[in-house]
Image (cartoon, rainbow, N blue to C red):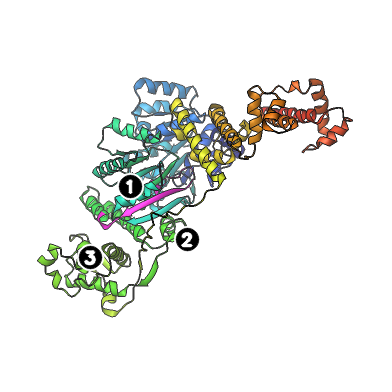
Amino acid sequence: MSLQHAAQALKKFFGYDRFRPLQAEIIQAVYDRRDTLVLMPTGGGKSVCYQIPAVTQDGTAIVVSPLIALMKDQVEGLSANGIPAAFINSSLDADQIRRIEDAALKGHIKILYVSPEKLVSQSFQPLLKRLKINLFAIDEAHCISSWGHDFRPEYTQLKFLKEQYPEVPIIALTATADKLTRKDILTQLNLDNPAVFIASFDRPNINLTVAPGQKRFEQILSFLKERPNQAGIIYCLSRKGCEGLAEKLLQRGFKAAYYHADMPQAKRSKTQEDFINDRVNIVCATIAFGMGIDKSNVRFVVHYNLPRNMEGYYQEIGRAGRDGLSASALLFFSYADVMSYRDMFEQSEASAEQKALKIAKLERMFQFAEALVCRRKTVLNYFGESYDSSCGNCDVCKNPPKQFDGTVAVQKALSAITRTEEKVGMTLLVDILRGSSRREIFENNYHQIKTYGAGKEYTYDDWMYLLLQMMHLGLVEIAYDDHHRMRVTETGKKVLFEGKKVPLAMPQAKEKVDARAPKTVEKSQAQINREELFERLSQLRKLVAQKQGVPPYLVFSDATLEAMADQRPYTDDAMKNISGVGERKLQLFGDAFIAEIRKFMIEKTNEGQRLVGATTLVSFDLYKNGKSIEEIASERNIQARTVLNHLAEMYEMGESIDIRQWLSAEASDMICGALPLFEEPYQMRSIFEHFNEKFTFDQIRLAIAEYRKASNTAKVKS
């Protein structure tokens, strides 16, 4: 099997003209029967790496997937693209499973998804033995490693695959795995001399923003108002938090719902289906939500609380912008989140080693949140990818903090910690520095220390921001085992007693916007047209999806609709060139979307706008309504020859037009027979003179259209 076959399948089934980085190399490795480990960020195109080999080779691919929702979503997407696929899991009854197994044995299923529990069960082994398996794909492969962030014990049993099917290549895929986890995946699966592919983890289309956790709801409201009707996920730490936030958003008029493990299964399923089908725009959820969703048009992910590790954070924000269009990731953080996680980890039944690992990963996450360098640089460096430049698409790059000499501020804070005998936490320390009348301060006589009220020049939020930097710089630390009290480190003592200088960054104050004079950016007519057509195509997509009983993004992605709105394809050939339009989707949906685009172009032309190709469509539309060339010319105030040129162009593009009323078969044969003597682009006068002026320019133009149409048809058949 060659990569040429793979490229043809990519175009036929998925509508893409070229592979993304590393996909072709990975597919070639599978063709070469090599075991393979693939690390690609969420939305990077991992699935194609096993789906293309599956459909281009004899036999069936077995895909191990951890979630029912994930299997269902993948199978629906493959079916929409014309690829026979199915899944077997606990959601099916015995009769359904038997029918799928029979279809697989008859060779009617190219890709079969199963849960790890089902794959290792004794009842499934006879089917495996009888199937012609072309590859095993282990999705979410990080689940096999106890060093990963989402360990699943059942995954560790998958090592039997290499033992019992040594000749079948295994491809293990994951979006998030550090070096230790990668090594463990290879060991646990016992892969034979595997090819390892690590794609860039960079998702440049996602804007990364981190904000302090104060007034989160107000910040979220502002964020959402800038993104009306966009789909997004807001991750919350607690189930109660999910419900409360969703209720508050509903009260403010947003289409929101919540999702967590304590909900009845039916309600969880309804929330997920409503989100997938665009009936709900926003889901407030715990981190379990989204793993089984391949929804391509999620435009934002918000973390209401600090994620517990970098792997989870990057996997979750990767659920936004899977179509490659602009997306946003907003993360709120506070030290209270860190304390909540630490308490959770300490109270768990995990081993001391696992607890230490979780805490270390949490600390890295916290360092990312408080870092004052490019966010993307921090993330990519964590995953071992060098990134020397600044991304220009994160909050730090867009608003670089101004450095100032923070030595005096640091000394005030360190002095207050020392004078309270290191018995206060961060919040109480700030209240002391700001001279608060809090009862606890007076009960402990903290109002009598020298630094009481010494930091009134900074707001509460500013002090919290400065203290976080002090932690990051190693000037103070938290005694987690002693009520989270603050301690001065040896480095901090050098600042306090030896005058060591400390540069700090202050958060920039937000500019106040005058509501009476909002800033507006004048849109061009072309931009207005694109946005209007995109919206119309989106509404059409929703109607088509409802009739088909599939999620809208499985009809066409936002990126594909954006390309349609920009290029306005109004023929089958033009639509084929739109990325994301494969043969199956063109057959199912092409006519409806082409009709909507044509309708839009005709309307704009009738309004006086001049769109490329639109005047041709207007003439053709009038012709379809029964008007003659002369009537069309009169109504449009153009020459009859121009109208005939329009009709010739539409005929050439495949439209049904009876050109014999203007061009006889005999004349067509003579002109078309001579066209090989001339080169494209044809010069009408040369042909006219070749026949000693026997045929009119109109007849020649129509004959050229018929010749080109016949040539295009022959190419398609070949």
Q: Earlier in the sequence, mark 1 or mark 3?
A: 1
Decide whether residue 322 is among the magenta residues: yes
Q: Quadrant of the N terminus?
A: top right
Which residue is outermost to the left? 443
Residue type (three-letter) at the residue carrying disc 3? Val
The boundaries of the magenta stretch are 314-336
Disc 3, disc 2: CB below 8 Å? no
Which of the two residues, 656 or 312, is positioned nearer the viewer here? Answer: 656
Disc assigned to residue 390:
2
Quarter of the image with the C terminus is: top right
**Residue 146 marker:** 1
- Label 1 neighbour load within 10 Å: few <14, some 14-19, many 20+: some
Residue kind at label 2, given as amino acid type: Ser
Relative image position of residue 179 (x, y in whole percent):
41, 53
* Contact flag, marks 1 and 3 (Cβ < 8 Å): no
Q: Is residue 615 magenta?
A: no
Residue under the point 58% across and 42% down: 18
Which residue does the image show at 48% across and 43% down from the upper left?
Answer: 36
Q: Residue 49, relative to residue 373: is it above or below?
A: above
Measure the alpha-carbon separation of dots 2 and 1. Answer: 34 Å
Q: Where is mark 3, residue-wise?
A: 430
| Secondary structure beneath label 1 | loop
- Nearest the viewer among 204 and 363 is 204
Q: Is residue 440 above or below residue 634?
A: below
Measure the alpha-carbon separation of dots 3 and 2. 33 Å
Horizontally, residue 466 falls left or right of residue 402, namely left
Q: Are marks 2 and 1 in contact (CB under 8 Å)?
A: no
- Secondary element type, mark 2: loop
Q: Give the mark, 3 or 2, whose residue is nearer the N terminus.
A: 2
**Label whose residue precedes the other's in the sequence (2 or 1):** 1
The total of numbered circles placed on residues is 3
Across and down, in percent, residue 310 comes to: 36, 52
